[in-house]
Image (cartoon, grey):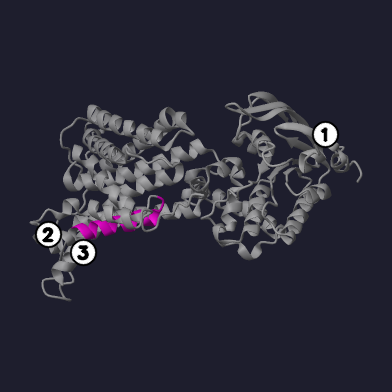
Amino acid sequence: MGPFLETLFGGLMVGMLYSLVALGLVLIFKASGVFNFAQGAMVLFAALTMARFAEWLPHLTGLNNKFVDNVLAFAGAALVMVAMAWTVQKLVLGKLVNQEGITLLMATLGINYFLEGAGQALFGNDIYKIDVGLPKDPIFLFEKTFQGGILVNQEDLAAAVIAAVLVAALALFFQKTATGRALRAVADDHQAAQSIGIPLDRIWVIVWAVAGLVALVAGVIWGSKLGVQFSLSLVALKALPVVILGGLTSIPGAIIGGLIIGVGEKLSEIYIGPMFGGGVEIWFAYVLALAFLLVRPQGLFGEKIIDRV
Amino acid sequence: MVARPTGEVILDVHNISLRFGGVKALSDISFDVREHEIRAIIGPNGAGKSSMLNCINGVYQPQEGSISLRGQTFRHMNSRQVAQMGVARTFQNLALFKGMSVLDNLMTGRHLQMRSNLFQQAIRWGAAEREETEQRVVVERIIDFLEIQAYRKIPVGRLPYGLQKRVDLGRALAMQPQVLLLDEPMAGMNVEEKQDMSRFILDVNAEFGTTIVLIEHDMGVVMDISDRVVVLNYGRKIGDGLPEQVRNDPEVVSAYLGTVH
């Protein structure tokens, strides 16, 4: 029982992070119908910004309080992500209103390359460290309940809590504020939203900004775990099977899809890994997504699209 | 029927032509709408009625002509600008926010009246809360008016069609518009639902003094509730006047019933 639960917990925590990246994808897709290929690059870009700001700030301000530096760096990176959202809307997507989905997808592919390049040009392409003071030591849980307890990485636990709080805050924002209501309205029907005077371009800036902030949180958590490096942008590849599983239009779907993939790949590694000589973790998500595409292409919670012929 | 429309011209459409590639959807259409009247646009399928409404609403941009709204003349309208000038619309094929409750759908109609910013809303700042309550009062009045109290919290997508149409009207009314554009508000309804809808339209007009531009297929309904009627056929205007004048116009009759050859 112990090892099983340990794997399960580990999977849930990794899954939470996949969920965060997928959440960014879903937010943008729901509100604007754009599949944002650049979500991974946004994670990398945000993490790079945060890492370098945290490094530079003590030199600039002379402050050597790590907490204050981190807060300032985070706020700075958040501002950069909001500015990025504004720029993307003004320079790219704003010019492509009413274009085909594939055109918009290609545009985000361009944004993807731009952010990867610009991020590394501005902030360097070494491996950088983000240290926001997440506890590193593993701890044992439930030692009383069964023998040996469960070994849990405190850092993962903290990350999962942060991710959960962020998701809850977003859910409240969407459900309880007037702007959140306008966002949901735009997601449901562009034309109707426009006819009652909701400004689409402003809503899209807000959505990209929120997706940028979600990317920042994901980037900081992954970055403090693995270091900030180019491979961070590849995390987004794992978000693809997550949204296929959960449905591209469902926020709960992104979260549950992420958890299923996280848990699934860890458990499969342990239980069916030996049959294939290991390495199951790497491809498990994609095979699961493929199976879903065959059986339930709209995902677990996605809207089934029925076209009138 | 007495010639009631004596108000000022609030909406004036001048020589509008709209083409989609080689297809002429509208050719040289002009008509005016006076304050507080119910103005119907009728015509057979494909006559260009919805295209006309979409031009006024800023969804389509006509190649020629201009539209004057409350004294301001525009070459092209823009949906948001039109909304800001007090024009609301409903849609032929329901365009409601299906996942949202009836209440939320109507509240979105108050969006333009919201003054608080994102951060005030996010931290539930006093003014943002107060504003939400004020808007809610307006919306509740409309809910009472349309007799949909019982469905307040139900996601719109789950309501029957007739009620969805009513919510669509409610969302437009929540804007407290001066001009209301209704695109086939009675399409697909049974007789009873049509009677309810006609009653609501007349009440809106009488109680709030809202000017109404109405597209409708059902000739009977149009003749009963509208003050003046424009008739379109194949993108051209073939009639304009009081309902009884239009009804007896030979060209209109032949457009609707076909001519004897």
Q: Position of residue A108 (x, y in %)?
A: 35, 34
Which residue is at the front of the view, A34 or A167? A34
Residue type, label 3: Leu
Residue A17 image point, x, y percent: 27, 52
Q: Residue A96: which quarter of the image?
A: top left
Q: CA distance from mark 3 to mark 1?
A: 72 Å
Read off the chain for label 3: A
For label 2, the residue is A273
SS at badge 3: helix
Q: Residues within 10 Å of mark 3 (few under 14, many from 20)?
A: some
Quarter of the rendering containing residue B14: top right
Residue B9 in the image, given as x and y percentages of width and height: 80, 33
Q: Disc 1 marks which residue?
A: B8
Please indicate, yes or no, whether residue A229 appears anywhere in the rendered image.
no
**Mark number displayed over residue A8:** 3
Q: In this image, A226 relative to B229: left or right?
A: left
Q: Chain of mark 2?
A: A
Residue B46 shows in the view: yes
Q: Earlier in the sequence, mark 2 or mark 3?
A: 3
Q: CA distance from mark 2 to mark 3?
A: 15 Å
**In whole angstroms, how far apart are the C-alphas of marks 1 and 2?**
80 Å
Quadrant including the N terminus of chain A: bottom left
Q: Nearer the viewer, mark 1 or mark 2?
A: 2
Q: Residue at x 51, y 55 (%)?
A: B99
Per the rendered image, the range of residues in magenta is A249-265
For label 1, the crowd category at 10 Å Cα-Cα, with few meaning under 14, some 14 to 19 and many 20 or more, is: few
The kind of residue tagged 1 is Glu
Q: Does the magenta segment cover residue B10?
A: no
Q: Are marks 2 and 3 on the same chain?
A: yes
